[in-house]
Amino acid sequence: MYFNSIDFAVFLPVVFLLYWFVWQKNLQKQNLFIVLVSYIFYGWWDSRFLVLLVVSSMIDFFASQAIFRTTDVRKRRLWFILSIASNLGILGFFKYFNFFADNFASAFTFMGFEFTQRTLEIVLPVGISFYTFQTMSYTIDVYRRKLEPTHDVIAFMAYVSFFPQLVAGPIERAKHLLPQFYTPRTFNYQLAVNGTKQILWGFFKKMVIADNCAILADTFFNNHNAYPGSYLLLGAFFFAFQIYGDFSGYSDIAIGTARLFGFDIMKNFAYPYFSRDIAEFWRRWHISLSTWFRDYVYIPMGGNQGTTPAKLKNIIVVFVISGFWHGANWTFVCWGLLNALLFIPLLLNKSNRQHLDVVAKAKIWPTFMEAMQMCFTFMLVMLLWVFFRADSMHTAFCIIGKIFSSSIFQFPYLPKEGTVALTLLLITFFIAVEWSGREHAYAIEYAAKDRPVWIRWTFYALIVSMTGMYMQTGGSPFIYFQF
């Protein structure tokens, strides 16, 4: 079920009313209700894949209990390997089988051997990368003895399948979310209002910014051979705001929806396009995934300790794996590698943690240097998004080649001039709101801070009106559903 669908518009209020007015007095029944509605939410897309969700949950539930009970090191390791191998095996088959089959066949053909290529018609289950990582983090924490396994199977199933963040995150840690299913929850009006406002801003990001940018980005990327570099640079610009509006919009809706039900889930985006270097960008973009790789891959490998070659190896490995997590295509691997190459100079210069605070904190405008740093970082990120968006390495290099050719100076004569102008105006408004609210959890939270009621409601009405006026009625699926 998509957030931006009529189905969800009916589903959410019905679930909300039943949750608070029918099941509120019994915590166990309330948690069971969350599991059931979460399975309905997920199964709405394709009920067959509910089996994978249940299997993944049960593997980690029982394996973690076995790991915790035994003191035998070999048995603990065996259960741990069984859990991790099962999760990665399921993820690998559905997401990467055809990728490896294709590349295996290509390698043999390249060496002159005859090879009959076999691929399968595999449908990628929505959100499998997200809930797989969520259950794996639980088992890893139990194995490290940083967490005691739960004996409440209903609470655990609710933690894994919690519908607001099930299919595209944030990737929650058991230490943060799971205890919230043990605690009786009562309706909090202020929390619900705050959640509703964040949902509103999430829908604006997705349905106005992302969906309008998607039309133009698709126009230029899908016909890249017909356009000069200036058009393709503009296409990369629109895709940068498409993917940010799309994914951070989903996260805002997920976080806001969780608040409606009395839950707190982690922040996933912190105004990444206001970053002053690539290291700051990765502290602010898809925070739940970045911190997951930091805690479960980068630090166990040695992190920033050891020799310089070891540090470089660790950075490259974690960025390449992160890229590969996004999809079974060499473009994602290249995208991850290029991000690593931009990160390495900061690491070697020991300036990768230079910008830890909000840019221009408590100020209206950034300094000239900060503005230049933000523009330069955004340009780098925008160009790297070309590899993320392109369907092949050939296409990516073709687009990059044109952007860095003399055709970049050709003034765009745009096929959809009115649409481009309107979208640029919407992006300008969006940036202004995000900049004004950059010190808050989400951009329009600041609108409620010490302002008269009529100003707040006028602003909210403006957001609702703009969403109604400029949303794309056809809509488009959230980009990260494919991961």
Image: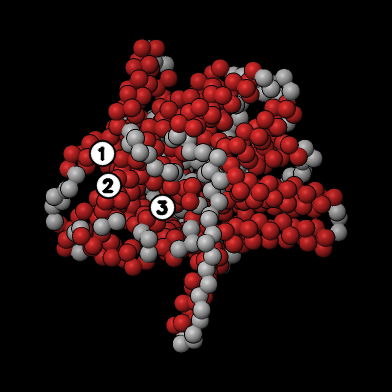
Q: Are marks 2 and 1 in contact (CB under 8 Å)?
A: yes
Which residue is label 2 attached to?
216
Classify mark 2: helix, strand or loop. helix
Q: Can you give x and y, in whole percent of width and height, for residue 138 in the image?
A: 69, 47
| In the displayed structure image, the side of residue 58 where residue 482 appears, left or right | left
Q: Is residue 374 visible?
A: no
Mark 2 against mark 1, which lies toward the viewer? 2
Residue named by callout 1: 423
First in residue order: circle 2 vs circle 1: 2
Q: Is residue 448 left or right of residue 86?
A: left
| Mark 2 nearby-residue class (10 Å; few <14, some 14–19, many ≥20) | many
Residue where numbered disc 3 is placed:
278
Give percent across and percent down for residue 234.
Answer: 24, 50
Q: Earlier in the sequence, mark 2 or mark 3?
A: 2
Q: Secondary structure at mark 1?
A: helix
Residue at x 22% of width, y 40% of height: 419
- Observer-nearest of 4 and 246: 4
Tell me which amino acid carries mark 1: Thr
Q: Which circle, 1 or 3, is nearer the viewer?
A: 1
Q: Is residue 335 above or below residue 478?
A: below
Q: Callout 3: few (<14), some (14-19), or many (20+) C-alpha neighbours within 10 Å?
A: many
Closer-to-camera residue (47/298): 47
**2 and 3 marks in contact (CB < 8 Å):** no
Quote the CA–CA distance across marks 1 and 3.
26 Å
Q: CA distance from mark 2 to mark 3?
A: 26 Å
